[in-house]
């Protein structure tokens, strides 16, 4: 007579070792990660409405300038600031009105010449010749003989109430970097910069299986001894919370043949498999035997010195991770959070979860089992002295509600038998935290920065302040690096003469500055760069688009102009892209920009100077890991090759 199935399982359990080998948490994680490929999954193009929460698979550059043209920021009159420099209540300036009114979507047809103005609405394109907008509140209409005029009662500065083309983001400039997580703000940026889709890392497909003869679907009638399968719903939600696509596979009996078929089906469909139950030392432990026969490397860890979570099993079939979690809900949720989530987020291209910790004192004595690191769920309460108290929940690993009621958890070390009341603890809060940039680069605008930062994958913030502005920020300790191309007229040297105590200079790359103009413009034919500047400065019909004061390009051009102030001198956007956009769109006829940006806009280019773009580095920030990574990239052969390909000359 054959054995009862339960007796047969008990006999197998008696012969079975408790666990293959119990290891500590760090060793378990090391073995698991060593067997896996933790690179982000391949990219897929997704519509913006479906991109929320996804990670960018590669850098995304702006497809259009934002704004796409110079535009008015207020209702009023577009004019030349030089005409309005002396305006005031006592002596208003009288300007002749041009015969057009510019509204949003209207293309200007009349150039604003000296002594004239054009009525313009907020958001409308700025006409050629204008470099400022006067608010309508500062004006009055004058219908005196000679046609309509406007009386201006307040002085207007160059660039006042003008949003320059590319002032927000310029075409070809990196908008978002690889690894950026797309929230509503990032999706709005992509749309404003001309993108309808985003290259996102594919969501990892995670098969979720439950095992146990006692389990039944939630909501189904429960027979004696039956319990609802809450783990599958919890785990599927945690998969989605961490960037994955859950594939619910159902509930399976504690039977080797059944479980083998279920795992084979899951491995065929998924990038990762998560199973709860069937991993304890009892009669139902069949998972490690099944996994051992599905392909190398098989079971990597079976048993971790944790409480809750000791029965955890970590495996891989080929490069597909398989996590077999304890069946009790708190144990399953905790071990999923600690071991599965880091792998899942890596595959999804998402950054590791940032855990926020808060200092508290333990409200009650909490015993612990010697030899196992114990994680205790706790809630926070305010003590009589105003400090925070960590109150252990006192619920076991079978509790379904522990994670929902807890504010966080703290660890009791493996070599401790517990913690006394009043002991200080660091409570790891359940939930994420805001992520600050790892690297801040201020100073001159250069597309070469995109090449370097794109290779690093750092959370970087770039502030376009101009070379002198970046130098000042570095001196005040407000940035990690300041990009600059400052020419010292006395020595002919770049950047070195501007070094100050507390700063050091790190060499970057060479780049060519030159005069940009529209191809086919005969006024620049046969000229070199310096001659082109002289010719353009002497021709009142040629309109300049200048650069902002303090930029290295402005310093270079001012030296070549030798005091001249050609038409358009007061038009001062803050980037090479904005200069090239103005010339390409016919709002200006010439300017000075770097060769790589001019090429991207299809402009003519006459070289002026091979300049050196370097970085001022505050000594106190030199040891920061992100700074060292950036400096290492400057010396990396692959990065240097990419810079050369982009038109730069690495130092």
Image (tube, helix red, strand yellow):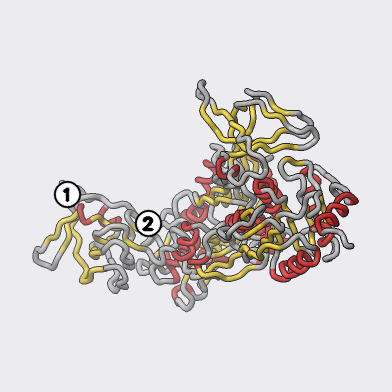
Image location (x, y in percent) of residue 488: 56, 48
Q: Residue 261, position in %: x, y?
A: 76, 69
Residue 487 vs residue 409, the one in the foreground: 409
Residue at mark 1? 91
Q: Residue furthest left?
A: 145
Would residue 362 appear left or right of 299 to someone viewing this image?
A: left
Residue of label 2? 570
Rendered position, 317 above or below 439: below
Q: Dot 1: few (<14), some (14–19), or many (≥20) neighbours within 10 Å?
A: few
Secondary structure at badge 2 equals loop
Residue 239 showing in the rendered view: no
Front residue of 490 and 547: 547
Q: Is residue 489 left or right of residue 8?
A: left
The residue that appears at 57% across and 61% down in the rendered structure is 54
Query: Camera-side residue: 140 or 313?
Result: 313
At x 82%, y 66%, the residue is 294
Task: From the top left corner, tell me how far across and down residue 281 is, in percent.
Answer: 81, 49
Dot 2: few (<14), some (14–19), or many (≥20) neighbours within 10 Å?
A: many
User: In this orientation, which residue lies closer to the viewer: 305 or 91?
Assistant: 305
Q: Is residue 273 above or below residue 477?
A: below
Q: Quadrant of the N terminus?
A: bottom right
Residue depicted at x 17% and y 47%: 89
- The answer to whether residue 189 is visible is yes
Q: Which of the labelled discs sits on residue 198, or is there none?
A: none
Q: Position of residue 487 (x, y in %)?
A: 56, 50
């Amino acid at each position: 007579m054959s054995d009862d199935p339960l007796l047969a399982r008990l006999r197998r359990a008696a012969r079975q070792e408790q666990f293959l080998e119990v290891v500590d948490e760090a060793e378990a994680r090391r073995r698991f990660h060593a067997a896996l490929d933790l690179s982000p999954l391949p990219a897929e193009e997704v519509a913006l409405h479906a991109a929320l929460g996804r990670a960018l698979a590669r850098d995304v550059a702006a497809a259009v300038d934002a704004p796409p043209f110079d535009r008015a920021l207020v209702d009023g009159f577009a004019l030349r600031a030089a005409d309005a420099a002396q305006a005031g209540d006592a002596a208003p300036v009288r300007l002749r009105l041009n015969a057009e009114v510019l509204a949003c979507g209207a293309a200007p047809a009349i150039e604003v010449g000296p002594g004239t103005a054009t009525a313009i609405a907020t958001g409308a394109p700025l006409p050629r010749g204008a470099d400022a907008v006067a608010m309508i509140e500062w004006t009055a209409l004058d219908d005196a003989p000679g046609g309509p005029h406007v009386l201006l009662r307040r002085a207007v500065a160059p660039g006042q109430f003008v949003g320059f083309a590319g002032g927000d983001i310029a075409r070809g400039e990196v908008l978002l970097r690889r690894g950026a997580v797309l929230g509503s703000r990032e999706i709005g940026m992509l749309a404003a910069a001309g993108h309808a889709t985003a290259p996102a890392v594919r969501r990892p497909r995670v098969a979720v299986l439950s095992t146990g003869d006692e389990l039944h679907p939630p909501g189904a009638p429960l027979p004696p001894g039956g319990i609802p399968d809450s783990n599958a719903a919890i785990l599927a939600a945690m998969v989605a919370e961490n960037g994955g696509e859950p594939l619910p596979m159902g509930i399976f009996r504690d039977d080797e043949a059944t479980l083998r078929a279920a795992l084979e089906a899951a491995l065929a469909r998924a990038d990762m498999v998560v199973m709860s139950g069937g991993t304890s030392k009892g009669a139902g432990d069949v998972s490690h035997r099944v996994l051992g026969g599905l392909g190398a490397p098989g079971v990597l860890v079976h048993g971790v010195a944790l409480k809750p979570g000791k029965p955890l099993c970590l495996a891989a079939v080929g490069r597909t991770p398989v996590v077999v979690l304890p069946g009790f809900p708190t144990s399953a949720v905790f071990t999923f959070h600690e071991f599965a989530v880091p792998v899942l987020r890596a595959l999804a291209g998402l950054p590791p979860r940032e855990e926020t910790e808060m200092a508290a004192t333990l409200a009650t004595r909490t015993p612990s089992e010697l030899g196992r690191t114990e994680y205790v769920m706790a809630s926070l309460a305010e003590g009589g002295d105003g400090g925070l108290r960590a109150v252990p929940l006192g619920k076991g690993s079978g509790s379904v509600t522990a994670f929902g009621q807890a504010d966080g958890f703290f660890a009791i070390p493996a070599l401790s038998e517990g913690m006394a009341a009043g002991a200080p603890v660091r409570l790891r809060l359940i939930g994420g935290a805001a992520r600050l940039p790892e690297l801040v680069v201020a100073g001159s605008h250069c597309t070469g920065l995109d090449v370097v930062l794109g290779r690093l994958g750092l959370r970087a913030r770039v502030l376009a302040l101009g070379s002198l502005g970046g130098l000042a920020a570095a001196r005040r300790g407000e940035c990690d690096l300041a990009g600059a191309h400052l020419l010292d007229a006395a020595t002919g040297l770049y950047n070195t003469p501007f070094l100050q105590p507390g700063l050091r200079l790190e060499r970057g790359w060479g780049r060519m500055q030159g005069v940009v103009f529209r191809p086919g413009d005969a006024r620049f034919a046969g000229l070199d760069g310096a001659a082109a500047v002289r010719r353009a400065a002497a021709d009142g019909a040629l309109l300049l688009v200048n650069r902002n004061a303090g930029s290295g390009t402005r310093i270079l051009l001012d030296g070549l102009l030798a005091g001249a102030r050609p038409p358009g001198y007061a038009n001062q956007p803050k980037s090479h892209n904005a200069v090239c956009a103005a010339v390409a769109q016919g709002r200006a006829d010439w300017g000075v920009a770097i060769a790589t940006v001019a090429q991207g806009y299809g402009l003519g280019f006459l070289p002026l100077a091979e300049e050196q773009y370097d970085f001022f580095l505050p000594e106190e920030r030199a040891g920061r890991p992100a700074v060292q990574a950036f400096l290492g990239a400057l010396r990396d052969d692959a990065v240097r090759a990419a810079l050369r390909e982009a038109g730069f000359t690495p130092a």
